[in-house]
Image (cartoon, helix red, strand yellow):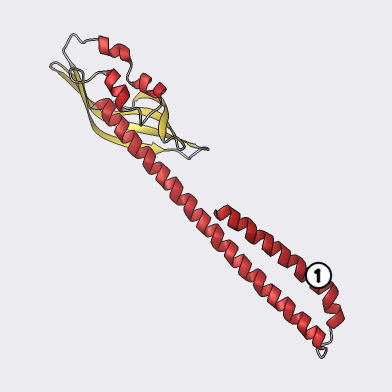
Amino acid sequence: MEIKQKSIILGLGFACGIIVTFLIAFVLPMGGNKDNPRGAVTQQIIEDSKKEISSLKEELENAEKTLKQSQDGKNQQQLTDLQTTAHSLFKIYYDYDQSQITNEERQKVVATLVSSEVAQTLFPLSADKSSSDYGSIQSQLNSLQVYAQPQTGTSITAFVDCDYTASAGDLKSNVPHYIFQVTYDTKVKKITGVTELGKVGK
């Protein structure tokens, strides 16, 4: 809507500019005498046209400002959507008890958050058939940070920094700064790519 308004204003401004140029080039010399009523009318037309162009420029600047504010607001909302999606996804990923839920079930839970490819990558069905010598595997998400990169087209890439605790039987380990790289599609509002980068630091 703002782009259409901008095009209309530009067109009107251009047309008025042509009119003023025509008046200055052809009409003004004919009415150069200030005592000539025709010249006074021509001068008034020119002044009115200049005011109209000035008004159109002001409208254009306001339209551009409104468009920029709209785009900034839209970008901020997309970043918020990315962060919300990432938090929801990795909470499901890390708040896990092997004895209570299967990866098949978790794939269904995250269907609204990620593409089917990402669901299969994070929650492989083969894990439902595996077991640990130490007992049932459990984990819990302690904290998570999302660091978004500049948007490219309809995609936003971000690094997700996870701090979680994992346990199996009597074994328990806290794992800070485990990093994933994700790609968020702003059109479908889903995470469509994920790469496990691993632990950073000790």
Q: Where does residue 125 sit, x and y in percent of width and height?
A: 31, 14
In-front residue for pair 11/156: 11
What's the residue at 33%, 16% (across, down)?
124
In-front residue for pair 196/129: 129
What's the residue at 80%, 74% (across, down)?
24
Q: Where does residue 54 sit, x and y in percent of width and height?
A: 64, 70
Judge the density around disc 1: few (<14), some (14-19), many (≥20) Cα neighbours within 10 Å: few
In-front residue for pair 138/100: 100
Res. 108 image quadrant? top left
Disc 1 residue type (three-letter) = Phe
Res. 45 image quadrant? bottom right
In the depicted structure, whether residue 183 falls above or below residue 14: above
Q: Can residue 176 be seen in this view?
A: no
| Quadrant including the C terminus | top left
In the depicted structure, whether residue 164 falls above or below residue 59: above
Label 1, secondary structure: give it.
Answer: helix
Q: Is residue 14 visible?
A: yes
Residue, disc 1:
22
Res. 200 image quadrant? top left
Left or right of residue 6, residue 166 in this image: left
